[in-house]
């Protein structure tokens, strides 16, 4: 198995990067949709329905599969011989960042369900603040991998 991973490494890495880009795009965009949903739509109007469809499709069609692919290809990279120095700190800081990013994804899913049921309680300002979370986590993950601190 390790021979297959070593030979496939460039392909696995390429697919991992594409999946991460897709996932991050959704993590940046969905909270912004929530801001507009809160600030522009009235409960039950046409715009409210449009936002609900956009949010649901973004989560189910793009973000969910992208998160899954990110995890699968990331784990394949982690188990490729000679790629990860498990004696260093960086694999663990990256893993922490990815776990937190996954937690944020699930938090967004819960917020989308709140919009769907008409029970959203957060403001546009709160969603704007939460929109910074993926940026901070992305910085931790990229610095961990590139600088290897």
Image (cartoon, helix red, strand yellow):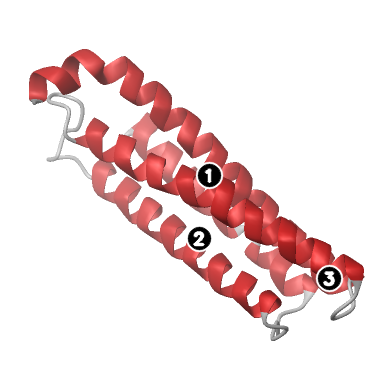
Report the number of numbered marks.
3
Q: Are marks 2 and 1 in contact (CB under 8 Å)?
A: yes
- Quadrant of res 112: bottom right
Q: State the CA–CA distance, disc 2 to disc 3.
A: 22 Å
- Quadrant of res 71: top left
**Quadrant of the snapshot with the C terminus:** top left
Q: Residue at x 53, y 44 (%)?
A: 23
**Quadrant of the snapshot with the N terminus:** top left
Residue position marked by numbered label 1 in the rendering:
23
Q: Is residue 135 visible?
A: no
Vertical placement of residue 89 versus 147, above or below: below
Mark 2, other Cα within 10 Å: few <14 / some 14–19 / many ≥20: many
- Quadrant of res 90: top left
Q: What secondary structure is marked by label 2? A: helix
Q: Residue at x 33, y 55 (%)?
A: 96
Residue position marked by numbered label 3 in the rendering:
48
Residue position marked by numbered label 2 in the rendering:
105
Relative horizontal placement of residue 18, taking residue 41 as reference (left or right)? left
């Amino acid at each position: 198995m390790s021979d297959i991973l070593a030979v496939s490494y460039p392909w696995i890495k390429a697919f991992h990067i594409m999946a991460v880009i897709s996932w991050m795009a959704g993590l940046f965009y969905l909270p912004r949709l929530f801001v507009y949903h809160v600030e522009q739509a009235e409960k039950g109007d046409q715009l409210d329905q449009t936002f609900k469809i956009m949010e649901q499709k973004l989560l189910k069609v793009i973000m969910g599969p992208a998160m899954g692919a990110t995890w699968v290809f990331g784990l394949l990279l982690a188990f490729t011989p000679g790629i990860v120095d498990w004696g260093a700190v960086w694999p663990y800081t990256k893993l922490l960042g990815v776990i937190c990013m996954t937690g944020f994804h699930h938090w967004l899913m819960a917020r989308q369900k709140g919009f769907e049921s008409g029970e959203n309680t957060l403001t546009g300002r709160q969603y704007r603040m939460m929109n910074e979370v993926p940026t901070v986590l992305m910085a931790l993950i990229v610095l961990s991998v590139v600088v290897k601190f």
